[in-house]
């Protein structure tokens, strides 16, 4: 029998775990042709998330869990899960029921037809603010324009991955992870299905605009060096303008003499150039920061406890 692993990163999700577990249980009962594994990644939750998961694991041998040693963020929680899933295919799903588990049978259908990566594209984003929708749209557009790989718009991490995609993702050991881009980067046969994204079932989002801004910078700096190119380009253009300007000024001075004027234009030029230089330095700094973080070669995460359902033995590390 083929096995489907459901990978669920969870951070402070005590309120939504029960409805999620019920819907996943229903999914497994309706699809008896497959074995299911529910692998919860507890990402250092500070509420009862871990206890609830442990309860499920004690009474249900489909449930496995990994308890990370602290909160590492969703991107790291996902790779921790991918490192440990045992299924022939893996579905990544949010704990907050924004991704309906009822879509999974359709994903499995396409997987059986030979697709490797079946991703769910959001038709609508109920319960999200206008600002979040627009900023996310812009971000995707910028990213798409500056990278050579196709980025899927309005697509989250909710998807079914064949074993070979999982093996590919496991080889990417970057510490500042932008998993959404990696799904595209690894390639393989992709299939898009659409759905209406629900608002969060309960609890609050773990994102704020500052985090999203950082995530956007991570996304751009991990997949493209275009900003560096843009600052070189700006430098080139500005030098060219300056060169023409110098010729004009020198000629003018030689021909007509030069009473000292031009304080406003001088200030404008100095401030403008200062701004461009600071931005360029910042861009270079972003990339150096990434190099710094990657050369340290730290392990991506530490596991406090891994409970694997099949043999029911607990491993402590
Ligand atoms: N999550 C996580 N670690 C974190 C933050 C979030 O594992 O540090 C999980 C969270 O429990 C949820 C998923 O990542 O299952 C998506 O988080 P959230 O719903 O807050 O993000 P949004 O849907 O608003 O983008
Ligand atoms: Mg959510």
Image (cartoon, rainbow, N blue to C red):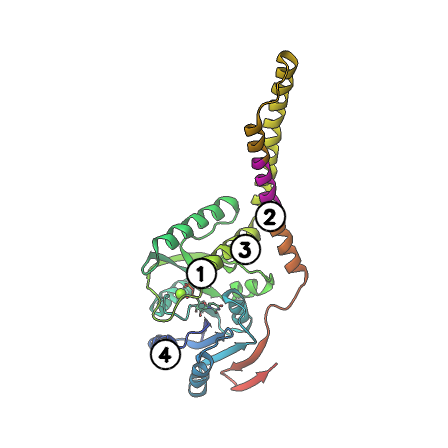
Q: Secondary structure at mark 1?
A: loop
Residue at the image position 64 percent from the left and 60 percent from the top: 293
Q: CA distance from mark 3 to mark 2?
A: 14 Å
Residue segment shown in magenta: 271-282
Given contact means CB atoms under 8 Å apart, are the residues at marks 3 and 1 in contact?
A: no
Q: Find disc 3 in the rendering and name its residue.
A: 218
Numbered disc in front, either 2 or 4: 2
Residue 307, placed above or below residue 264: below
Q: Quadrant of residue 72?
A: bottom right
Q: CA distance from mark 3 to mark 4?
A: 33 Å
* View quadrant of ligand 1: bottom left
Q: Is residue 92 left or right of residue 232?
A: left
Q: Quadrant of residue 59?
A: bottom left
Residue 232, placed above or below residue 35: above
Numbered disc in front, either 3 or 1: 1
The label on residue 219 is none
Given contact means CB atoms under 8 Å apart, are the residues at marks 2 and 1 in contact?
A: no
Q: Find disc 2 in the rendering and name its residue.
A: 282
Given contact means CB atoms under 8 Å apart, are the residues at marks 1 and 4 in contact?
A: no
Q: Secondary structure at mark 2?
A: helix
The label on residue 208 is 1
Q: Mark 3 near ligand 1 (CB under 8 Å)?
A: no
Q: Residues within 10 Å of mark 2 (few under 14, many from 20)?
A: few
Residue 49, image x and y in percent? Answer: 44, 78
Numbered disc in front, either 1 or 4: 1
Residue at the image position 54 percent from the left and 55 percent from the top: 218
What secondary structure characterizes most of the magenta part?
A: helix
First of labels 3, 4 by sequence position: 4
Residue at the image position 48 percent from the left and 65 percent from the top: 162
Q: Is residue 307 left or right of residue 22?
A: right
Q: Find disc 4 in the rendering and name its residue.
A: 18
């Amino acid at each position: 029998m083929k096995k489907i692993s459901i990978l669920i990163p969870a951070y402070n999700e005590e309120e939504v775990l029960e409805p999620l577990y019920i819907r996943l249980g229903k999914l497994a009962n309706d699809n008896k042709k497959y074995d299911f594994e529910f692998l919860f990644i507890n990402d250092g939750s500070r509420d009862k998330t871990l206890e609830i998961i442990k309860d499920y694991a004690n009474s249900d041998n489909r449930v496995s869990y990994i308890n990370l040693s602290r909160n590492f963020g969703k991107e790291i929680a996902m790779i921790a899960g991918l490192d440990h899933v045992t299924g022939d295919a893996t579905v990544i799903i949010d704990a907050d029921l924004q991704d309906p588990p009822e879509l999974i049978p359709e994903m499995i259908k396409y997987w059986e037809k030979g697709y490797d990566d079946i991703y769910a594209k959001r038709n609508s984003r109920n319960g999200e603010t206008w600002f979040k929708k627009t900023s996310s749209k812009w971000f995707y557009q910028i990213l798409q324009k500056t990278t050579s790989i196709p980025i899927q718009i309005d697509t989250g991490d909710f998807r079914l991955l064949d074993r070979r995609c999982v093996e590919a993702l496991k080889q990417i050991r970057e510490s500042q992870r932008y998993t959404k881009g990696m799904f595209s980067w690894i390639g393989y046969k992709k299939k898009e299905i659409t759905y209406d994204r629900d608002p969060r079932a309960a609890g609050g989002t773990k994102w704020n605009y500052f985090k999203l801004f950082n995530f956007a910078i991570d996304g751009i700096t991990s997949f493209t060096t275009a900003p560096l190119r843009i600052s070189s380009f700006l430098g080139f253009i500005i030098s060219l303008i300056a060169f023409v300007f110098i010729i004009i000024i020198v000629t003018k001075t030689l021909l007509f003499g030069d009473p000292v004027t031009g304080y406003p234009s001088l200030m404008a030029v100095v401030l403008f150039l200062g701004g461009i230089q600071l931005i360029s330095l910042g861009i270079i700094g972003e990339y150096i920061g990434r190099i710094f973080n990657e050369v340290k070669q730290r392990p991506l995460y530490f596991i406090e406890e891994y409970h694997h359902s099949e043999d029911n033995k607990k491993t402590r590390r």
